[in-house]
Amino acid sequence: MPNQRKQTFDYEFGGPIGTLATMIFLPLVTLLLTYWASIGEIEFANILPASESCSSGGSYAFVRDMILGSNVLCPSCSDPQTVVFCAFVVLSWFGLQVLLERVLPGEIVLGAPLPDGSGKRLPYRINGHLAFWVTLLLLNVGWPRWVEVHNGGEAMSALVFGRVPLSWLYDYHSTLAFVTILWTILLSSYLFLRSFGKGFLLAAGGDSGNPIYDFFMGRELNPRWGTFDWKEFCELRPGLIGWMVLNMSMMFKQYERLGYVTGSMILINIFQGIYVWDALYQERAILTTMDITTDGFGFMLVFGDLAWVPFTYSLQARFLVDHDPHLHWSMLAAIVGVNIMGYLIFRGANGQKDAFRRNPDSPEVSHLTFLQTKRGTKLLTSGWWGLARKINYTGDWIMGLSWCMVCGFESIVPYYYAIYFAILLIHRSIRDDHMCQEKYGEDWNKYKSVVPYRFVPGLF
Ligand code: NDP
């Protein structure tokens, strides 16, 4: 039977070979990007190890020497003490977010019906927005330290609480990224092994029978410890809030160096801070996304959520510490305009679909036209969703472009995000189109004839 399953399996991401290459390539790219952001250009000469390491030890030695030996990609990674300390920081951060998820009050919301046909819906604890604000509060007032105070000429020690010295995160940026990558490999391995236990619901796309492919895609759909949902938690908290904290650390570092914070640095912190806040404020909307309803929780999402998002999405702020583009205020104002336009499209489209799916008769969406499908659900054919089938992606991309623009126009490095995100969104839209075709059949073709454009109305 396993052979039959493999022959008919519909592989994505280039199958086992493509996913293996991705798993080797993306961690390296994460470290490469942090290095390029620090020097402000794309450069290979200093990172490639001596040719002997390749000929004597093969590709493993080559990769190892590139990370540990070049002293460029991760300067502190060869120092065990720093690595252990960074591991402590990364795990403590993860532990703090788990604690907040467990102890803070939150509404229990049911997810979408499970795809096994049972009609069962899993309960989720929605308190990410509160966790976001409590984290910010703790970062501002939660750092304990002893200081010497003088009481009538007598010196005494006193415990005081203040702001966490975040600029430290800039100093150990690449080591923190390296340790986080190791953590994602460990976590994915645990999740992969536990998925072979009895009674777990497997994701259709992660059950090919090929261990490399399934490790990448994720076998188990909703890995849980009791009511703790690993996937929903990792999608929104340690990585996403961590991204914002890394941005803040870059801002503090810039202030330490210059004695002031530049307009570009303020804008990137505001833009991306709002993006993170928005995702947590709208936490329940994630329950109907492809990541939660369809994809298993494997290396692809674990690495993406915990390592790729915080360490590569914070690249613009990292770049700005060392390379201020000195943009004129009029240019900054124009970039704010681009950002607002992207945000209005992104939030307008996602909010409209969410409101419509929750209650199509609510006054804000009751005027919209829709296609009633045989599957039972309704597809919007006017409003934002009548303009283009993935108009929400377009808004998201425009916002991303504004993040790159605050870094000026002299280096391509900060524009990595706009390039990478365009590829991600195009690929994701093809995956979603394929899944909708399977879900809706002829109805999907009808919908596509009513809304023919994918991203930009009238263009493509
Ligand atoms: P969507 O929010 O576009 O959801 C797609 C699903 O919506 C479809 O499978 C279908 O599911 C339903 N749908 C499609 N068309 C319609 C319609 N006309 N009317 C009603 N329902 C429809 O996709 P994602 O989950 O991929 O993305 C959510 C947001 O997250 C996006 O804005 C995206 O930009 C963002 N994102 C950001 C990332 C980042 O790294 N910054 C990464 C990935 C996403 P069904 O009918 O079965 O409900």
Image (tube, rainbow, N blue to C red):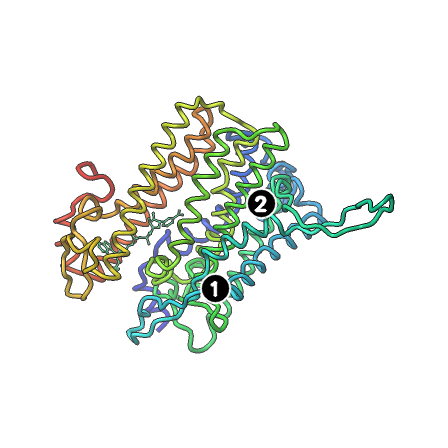
| Image quadrant in which the C terminus is located | top left
Q: Residue type at mark 2: give it.
A: Val
Asked whether, in this view, residue 146 is left or right of residue 400, the answer is right
Instruction: Please say if 442 is above or below 313.
Output: below
**Depth check: 286 or 182 in front?**
286
Q: Nearer the viewer, residue 365 or 62?
A: 365
Q: Does residue 220 appear in the picture of this structure?
A: no
Residue 348 lies left or right of residue 336; in this view the side is left
Q: Residue at horizontal 65%, vertical 55%?
A: 88
Q: Specify which label sits upstream in the sequence, 2 or 1.
A: 2
Residue 214: x, y in percent?
Answer: 43, 62
Q: Is residue 18 left or right of residue 257?
A: left
Mark yes or no: residue 174 visible: yes
Query: Dot 1: within a 10 Å radius of its alpha carbon, few (fewer than 14), some, or many (20 or more) residues?
Result: some
Q: Residue 98, image x and y in percent?
A: 54, 62
Q: Which residue extends farthest right?
A: 154
User: Which residue in the protein does label 2 denote?
Assistant: 63
Inspect the image, locate mark 1, and give the three-letter code of the amino acid beneath it. Trp
- In the rendered view of the protein, which quadrant contains the N terminus? bottom left
**Image quarter for residue 55?**
top right
| Residue contact at pointers 2 and 1, CB within 8 angstroms | no
Q: Position of residue 81 (x, y in %)?
A: 72, 49
| Residue at the disc numbered 1 | 230
Does any atom of ligand 1 lie closer than 8 Å to the CB of label 1?
A: no
Residue 457 drawn above or below residue 118:
above
Secondary element under disc 2, as helix, strand or loop, is helix
User: Residue drawn at (37%, 51%), measured in percent from left and top?
Assistant: 14
